[in-house]
């Protein structure tokens, strides 16, 4: 199988800003299989916690989680056409993103999320998540709507990161 790896798209790439399209079963099933294999290889090499399809240049509603989260995610690694309901208290956690390399910032989001999604066969499942798994899901679903975690930082933090982010968008080394 060729092309098992794709490079991760970096902030400034327009594909990261698009609203992704839903996947259709069974029409998209072969495409999904190839995409998931590609993304799993990419995530492993990049050593990230999760990866959304737009990050490898595919504007579709799919994300994957690292198998490290298997317990919390009840064995699920692939999430297709996710629908989410975030709830409970706001919670601050540090976030980073393979598409915004080298930047880690505390960000407040709801601490729990209910998610309904399809697996690679098109079977739907539901989970009720907290902790890091909830945070991962909220971060990845944002990618499917063209949102990056740095968009959600306070105006002051954004201002502090402005130079770094601009250099990233322009494709220059920042560190
Ligand atoms: Ni990300």
Image (cartoon, helix red, strand yellow):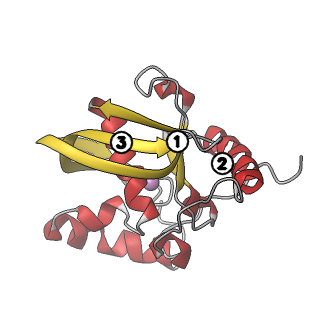
Q: Are marks 1 and 2 in contact (CB under 8 Å)?
A: no
Q: Quadrant of residue 58?
A: bottom right
Going from the N terminus, do you reach mark 1 or mark 2 first? 2
User: Residue at 83% of width from left, 54% of height from top?
Assistant: 3
Label 2 close to label 3 by CB (< 8 Å): no
Helix, strand or loop at disc 3? strand
Q: Residue at x 33, y 59 (%)?
A: 149
Residue behind mark 2: 39
Q: Name the residue at the right extreme.
A: 1
Residue 57 drawn at (x, y percent): 63, 66
Residue at image location 56% in from the left, 28% down from the top: 67
Closest to the camera, between mark 1 and mark 3, is 3
Q: Position of residue 38 (x, y in %)?
A: 72, 49
- Report which residue position mark 1 lands on: 48
| Quadrant of the picture in which ligand 1 is shown | bottom left
Q: Is residue 165 above or below residue 28?
A: below
Label disc, if present, on residue 79 of the rendered structure: none
């Amino acid at each position: 199988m060729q092309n098992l790896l794709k490079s991760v798209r970096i902030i400034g790439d327009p594909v990261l800003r698009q609203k992704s399209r839903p996947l259709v079963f069974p029409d998209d099933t072969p495409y999904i299989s190839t995409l998931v294999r590609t993304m799993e290889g990419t995530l492993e090499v990049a050593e990230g916690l999760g990866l959304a399809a737009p990050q490898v240049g595919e504007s579709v509603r799919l994300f994957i989680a690292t198998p490290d989260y298997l317990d919390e995610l009840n064995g699920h690694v692939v999430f297709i056409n996710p629908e989410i309901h975030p709830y409970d208290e706001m919670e601050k956690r540090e976030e980073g993103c393979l598409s915004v390399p080298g930047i880690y910032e505390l960000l407040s989001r709801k601490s729990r999320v209910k998610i309904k999604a399809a697996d690679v066969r098109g079977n739907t499942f539901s989970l009720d998540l907290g902790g890091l798994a909830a945070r991962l899901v909220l971060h990845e679903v944002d990618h499917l709507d063209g949102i990056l975690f740095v968009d959600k930082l306070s105006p002051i933090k954004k201002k502090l990161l402005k130079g770094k982010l601009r250099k990233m968008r322009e494709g220059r080394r920042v560190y």
